[in-house]
Image (spheres, coloured by chain):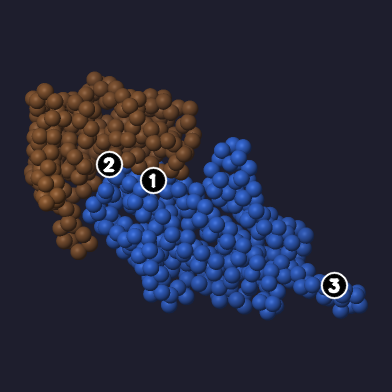
Amino acid sequence: MFGRIRAVIKATTLELVSEPLFFLLTISAVGVLTIASYLHVHQFGEPSRMARDVGLSSVLIFGTVFAVFSAIRVFRREIESGTLQMALSRPISRELFFLSKTAGAFLACIVFFVIVFSSTITTVVGAEVGKIHTETAMSAASHGHCRHDIMPETLWFVSLGVDACTVVLPLVFGAVLNRFARFRFTTTAFAVALVVSVSGCFYNIHLALVEFGDAVSFIPAYVKRILPVGVLLLAPVAVFLSAAAALSVKFKDNAVASFSGLIFLLFLPALGNYYQTQALHRGGDLPWSYVVWSFAAALPFAVAFLLMGVFLMRSKDVG
Amino acid sequence: MSNVIEVESVSKTFRDFWFRPTVKAVDQLSFSVAEGEVFGLLGPNGSGKSTTIKMLLGLLNPDSGNVKLFGKSPKTLAARSDLGYLPELSYLHPFLTAKETLRYYGGLCGLDSKTSRRRTRELLEMVGLADVANRAVGGFSKGMARRVAFASALIGKPRLLVLDEPTSGLDPVSTNEVKTLVKELVKGGMTVLMTSHLLGDAEDICDRVVILNRGVKVAEGAIGELGSSLSDFFLAKVGEGRKFEMAEFLK
């Protein structure tokens, strides 16, 4: 059984990370985050808040879109291309197939989440360091050191560089490895984006601590506070993925997208419980127990949608 | 010899979203396939061949009647464990390479990693695609894709091979290769059920056939029993109704 599950999850995740649209969605999220954080006029003196809120919003909004379209893609494509016939003629139950495909799509969402969330952390750290730069320069100016050229540095150049590399390096490596080694372009690009975003995040924090010492010693604790807020966003993403997966068994793409939009609107009031950036504002903390209970609260909805999907798959005439 | 396939009074009507009947695809069909034989399901386009196949595979639910594979319902995993299926069109994931495709279907058949790797290597050699094992199947020609699909049908070492129009759209050389392969597999003890509207291919390979027309069985028997020419017999059974329709249309 585990061999079958692994085969389906692997093929599904590979299908999604080979899809240019999903890669575009991921680097768009990173791009939006970087650009938004560099727009001075919108930050009202709180650049890291801007970076944090835009990053977490990107995870939620882009992540939801990624989840819904992943589910549509994996199920509708199987059904319409006929590969579902090939798969279900094998000794694998329809229930297991449906659940494994959904798990594969969720794994792709996790890849997306890690890339965008790492970039969020990188940009937040960059904004905090940038603020210190600006304050230092302005302090120097106020003590008679004439600095006519002070610009508010809202983003540290290292963070900007890491974010830019998260967008550019995957494209370069993907192209080079595709050209010379026949690697899949988008899969390579996703893998490079994952490595660059995660390693760049750690490097960024490490360099900030090395260069600025005590001035930025609060950063590791700050990042630890953002972590539960980010992980919490996976709960609504999982619910929307389950809903879209179930609907995709029965309905076509446009109908699934419309129904998913409707479900999003219905759950919008509850989404506030999962978007807890306010908890971080003014030094607040989101306890991990809240995250656990929130997942538990979302679980019945995800399970209900998954059961619906299992039922629809079981009764479906294939072919 | 025991029967590998038993189809008893099976009917299937397709319905629209509101459950209104649209097409009666199969009507009270019965036949059986013994172990080790090559059985042909023949008929013109739209006669219910593919629908029958899909009911045998558990992909479609019959409205009435019984279908058994190896004495079990096709819905059970045990029945499908010994089954290999080659659909009419080569439904493959275009982003997977030939090797990955076979490994994927090997995984679905429950093969462990080592066995899956070995079988993949053997089958790619057998179908002549070892040189392009790492190329995405999306870039394959029709014949190459068909060979990958054939190999994937054999990955689990099935006892029963179900071929839906196996030679449709293939050139004469590829058609001959398929026929030779089927004969070799049957010599090795495999049971084959194939559908076709190409009577020459059926005559070359099949031991027994059932002829369908509009979902109804119109003839059944061994190849030699149905007259000296299968195509004449087929036209006699199936063509009459069509001539009548054409006459009505032309009035």
**Which chain comes out blue in the rendered image?**
A
Disc 1 sits on a residue from what chain?
A: A
The numbered dot on residue A89 is 2
Residue A36: give x, y in percent of width and height: 64, 69
Upstream in the sequence, badge 1 or badge 2? 1
Amino acid at pointer 3:
Asp
Q: What SS does tag 3 mark?
A: loop
Q: Dot 3 surroundings within 10 Å: few (below 14), some, or many (20 or more)? A: few
Residue B187: give x, y in percent of width and height: 24, 20
B36 vs A33, left or right, is: left
The numbered dot on residue B216 is none
Quarter-wise, where is residue A53 in the image? bottom right
Disc 2 sits on a residue from what chain?
A: A
Amino acid at pointer 1:
Val
A183 vs B138, left or right, is: right
The residue carrying mark 3 is A149
Q: What SS does tag 2 mark?
A: loop
Location of residue B78 with respect to A58 vertically, above or below: above
The residue carrying mark 1 is A8
Q: Dot 1 surroundings within 10 Å: few (below 14), some, or many (20 or more)? A: many
* Label 3 to label 2: alpha-carbon separation: 71 Å
Residue at image location 55% in from the left, 73% down from the top = A277
User: Which one is nearer the viewer's eye here, A277 or B46?
Assistant: B46
Location of residue B161 with respect to A141 vertically, above or below: above
In the rendered picture, chain B carries what hue? brown
Upstream in the sequence, badge 1 or badge 3? 1
Are dots 3 and 2 on a single chain? yes
Residue A259: give x, y in percent of width and height: 36, 68
